[in-house]
Image (spheres, rainbow, N blue to C red):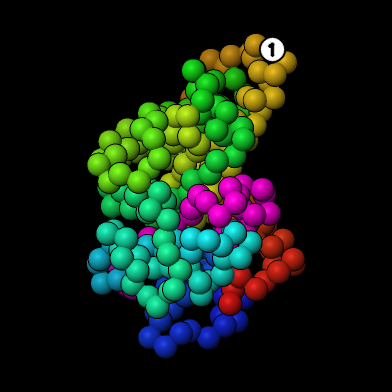
Amino acid sequence: MTPHTQAYALKPGQHPDERAARVQLAACYRVFALLGWTEMIYNHITVRLPDSVTGGEKQFLINPFGLHYSEVTASNLVKINLQGQVLDDSSYPVNPAGFTVHAAIHDGIEGAHCVMHTHTTSGVAVACLQGGLQQSNFYTAQLDGMVAYHDFEGITVHADEGPRLVQNIGNRPAVILRNHGLLAWGGTVPDAFLTLWTLQRACDVQLATLSMGAAIPISEAVARKSTHDAQRFRPAHSAGQDVFDALVRQVDRMDAGYRD
């Protein structure tokens, strides 16, 4: 939590942990906007609220449907349950396509505190590629054994797809939704962000490489070692948190209104 987190008063009856989650998630939306990871008013980043807020019921925060990521704030995030019911006084609707995927993962994967989904050009391109992500660059080498695939079943508005998605993900935090886009989940917002950022960079580099010709493959042994070594940069060792915080500071210099 940064010092700015306390800059705005709690709403009546709002738990401090919910307030902190709202500010961090709103900051993440602005970071995505800064990086260009937006899809008009579509796509989602969600955070499951802790039991201290919900009393054990699975509830999560999602962006208000109709707003661009640059318009998301701590106060206009929508709190919903696994059935998609709005639990606060929000007047904004929830996009069924986002709710279906995110609810399934928050419910079905115990460690999925945060779930992120994007439709970036290189992410969708690699998702459409017959072979998917190739083990051929610095970033793919940090994701050995971490990438799951889920086949395209159409627009994700049907709840029956949820169990198949969760089964295909297993415990792998980086997900390529075939013909669709990228997804990442993690135990914290910075953890999920670092996974998605690495996956996104892997796709960026692969797209650039394939435009020039065949890539040089990386051996399984080297990839396994690289992934093991990269773990020291995960949020538990502060670097992932530091990267996220650095981007939030950049957002703050531009517009800290997301904290409202």
Q: Is residue 112 at least partly visible in the picture?
A: no
Q: Is residue 2 above or below residue 110?
A: below
Q: Residue at x 59, y 20 (%)?
A: 136
Image coordinates of residue 101 in percent, x first then y, are 37, 47
Q: Residue at x 58, y 48 (%)?
A: 39
Name the image quarter holding the N terminus. Answer: bottom right
Name the kind of residue labelled 1 in the image.
Answer: Gly
In the image, 6: left or right of 88? right
Quick check: is 33 in the magenta stretch?
Answer: yes
Quick check: is 122 in the magenta stretch?
Answer: no
Q: Is residue 7 above or below residue 130?
A: below
Number of marks in picture: 1
Q: Which residues are magenta?
A: 27-53
Rendering quarter of residue 138: top right
Considering every residue shown, the one lying at the far right of the view is 253
Image coordinates of residue 218 in percent, x first then y, are 57, 17
196 or 92: nearer the eye? 92
Q: Is residue 50 above or below residue 222?
A: below
Q: Is residue 101 above or below residue 59?
A: above
94 or 135: nearer the eye? 94
Image coordinates of residue 82 in percent, x first then y, are 29, 58
Name the image quarter holding the C terminus. Answer: bottom right
Q: Is residue 193 at least partly visible in the picture?
A: yes
Considering every residue shown, the one lying at the far bottom of the view is 12
* Numbered disc 1: secondary structure: loop
Q: Residue at x 64, y 14 (%)?
A: 215
Where is mark 1, residue-wise?
Answer: 213
| Callout 1 crowding tier (Cα within 10 Å): few <14, some 14–19, many ≥20 | few
236 or 31: nearer the eye? 31
